[in-house]
Image: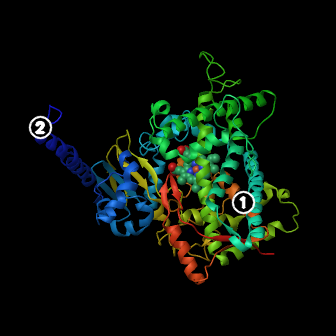
Amino acid sequence: MIFGIFSYAQVALGLLVVNIIYPLYRLRVNRQKAIATGLPYVYTAAYEWSVSWLLLRDIIHPVLQKLNLDWLVKYSGPSWNFYAKNTVHEKLGDIFCVVSPGGLSVFVGDPDVICEITKKRTKFPRPVKSVVKVMGYFGPSILSSEHDEWRFHRRVTNKTFTEPNHKVVWYDSLYQASAMRDEWISNLDQKTSTKEGIVFKMGSDCMKLALHVVTLASFGVQMPWTSQKEGPPPGYEMTFREASEFFLENLQFMAYCPKWLYKYGPKMCQDAGVAVKNMRRHMMELISIEDEKLQNGQDGKNLLSAMLQTDDPEARVHADQVHDSLSASKSGVRKDFVMGNSAIFLLAGHETSARSLEYALFLFAMHPDVQEEIFEEIDGILEGVGNIYDLKYEEVFPKMVKTSGVLYEATRLFPVTPYIPKSTEDVTNSWFIYKDKRYDIPPDSMVALNAIGVHYNPLYWPDPYTFKPSRWYQTHKQEPVKAEIQDTSRVSSSNFDAARLYKRGTYLGFGEGPRNCPGKRFAQVEIMATFLALFREHRMELVIEPWETRQEAFERAWGALQRSKMVITLNLFEEIKVRLVYRK
Ligand code: HEM
């Protein structure tokens, strides 16, 4: 007898039921569901969205690889769909199901169905319950809501991405990128003999640049490139920078660390608790500062200030509701909503922009021929310009058509989210039409809009593995695309958009449909200004080691890019050596 209650036989039977019989039963149930859809299906042993798999897969997967058993999780291993690209659709069809004991997932690589699903927002909602819990930390927000509540958040936050705000993004990006370049160049000049002018911190510098820009544009907090060592203000344990950096760097951990561990849990959980508490307090204070400014007739031209000026009835505390300075601004706007969304801007606008910039810069460095074409545009813009801050946003940004092709192409090859998660969470009657046939997707399934699948589909993107920004700005005649062409400028949030040559649903770098990225223009402005500042007098080149040819160096860098991993967003984990050199 063990524990004095159960016999060995009973324990063994219990383990058998929990670990083998029940999962097999669930696998059978989910297989039945897949069969009922009429779509092709494959099996995998672990459910991609299960919390325990998400936490343990980086430990379990290498063990399975060693034992030659990784085929068991072929369709749910770490970053599997980024590595598979379009090959999975070539083998299994445009749309297929992945069946596991934990659930059913449907992968969609057909552009028309992708558009239909994004349009049917209420039938294929974002899986807010299971995937984006952490996004609700600071209050209700656009990212953590669905249905009518999301409509309200989207309506109000859309109005905050204004041209005056983009101007702030433009000038701060010019400033931050110039400072970053100066730091890189000083390395080049002084330490040539030892470091050969190599940019070692590309990833962390892009993160720093994006954090600084989004903090100013969202909260009105200017962060100098070289930070003075400042301590937290009285009554705080962390500065705003420290708290937000902790939050952003440990997002995945924070998503799964229960709040009750904040106080008495292990140190990392306690640190998380301190970061959340400090971040909330800093944000409340920033809201009060903007609130006060607005009372004095000043508009901070940041996203927070814009939200405090909303007259949307749902964002306001009603006359019959009791409120105080903690729950409402002086003008009566709900603070929980302002706080939730400002935190989301920080979260959604930081790593996405940083990683896209990083990939764009590495790809740029690897393609000297592309650089020549882009420099033509940049030099034309900079001709006769003495001071870079004389470059007026509204005049210059719309001219950067070719340069913007670099960002589009980088996000096609390396989209921050290789698939966009949708679901049939809490809904019934979700279906789509594919090749004139209706397919019903059962409730509580995950639906993955496979960005990487369509981005590498040669039908829509000829020669899909090649970095070719020109495909975004050349005319139809110069580069025929087999699929139907649509003018996407109509759906873009601005008049300016280089992307006029793609079929809807074949490019998902910034999402698609009503839930697409509202910060797209913000990110474009940031990255275009960064390109201007960096490449005014310099070019970026891939370091060729003495033992290798140019082609070998290229292949080494390409291999490193292709071995990126998904950790919240797509991330590069291997070093690629590049250097900034004078070109004039
Ligand atoms: C290059 C940079 C960026 C990329 C590649 C990017 C990409 C994306 C993608 C793929 C989505 C999901 C769309 C969907 O579900 O269909 C998204 C959503 C979102 N993005 Fe971005 N983003 C970028 C920058 C930004 C910035 C700078 C901000 C704000 C300052 C921002 C704010 C948001 C928000 C709030 C959402 C959620 C929209 C909703 O749920 O309605 N993004 N972004």
The foreground one among 199 and 1 is: 1
Q: Which residue is mark 2?
A: 7
Say whether residue 67 is left or right of residue 291.
Answer: left
Label 1: which secondary element: helix
**One can see residue 432 in this view:** no
Say whether residue 155 is left or right of residue 399.
Answer: left
Residue at x 15% of width, y 44% of height: 12
Q: Is residue 275 above or below residue 493?
A: above
Q: Is residue 570 above or below residue 252?
A: below
Q: Position of residue 211 (x, y in %)?
A: 66, 49
| Total labels drawn | 2
Do labels 2 and 1 touch, CB within 8 Å? Answer: no
In the rendered image, which quarter is residue 557 located in? bottom right
Q: Residues within 10 Å of mark 1 (few under 14, many from 20)?
A: many
Say which amino acid is labelled 1.
Thr
**One can see residue 584 in this view:** yes
Q: Position of residue 491 (x, y in %)?
A: 60, 53
Label at residue 530 = 1
Say which amino acid is labelled 2.
Ser
Q: Is residue 237 above or below residue 15?
A: above
Residue at x 59% of width, y 66% of height: 409
Label at residue 572 = none
The foreground one among 440 and 304 is: 304
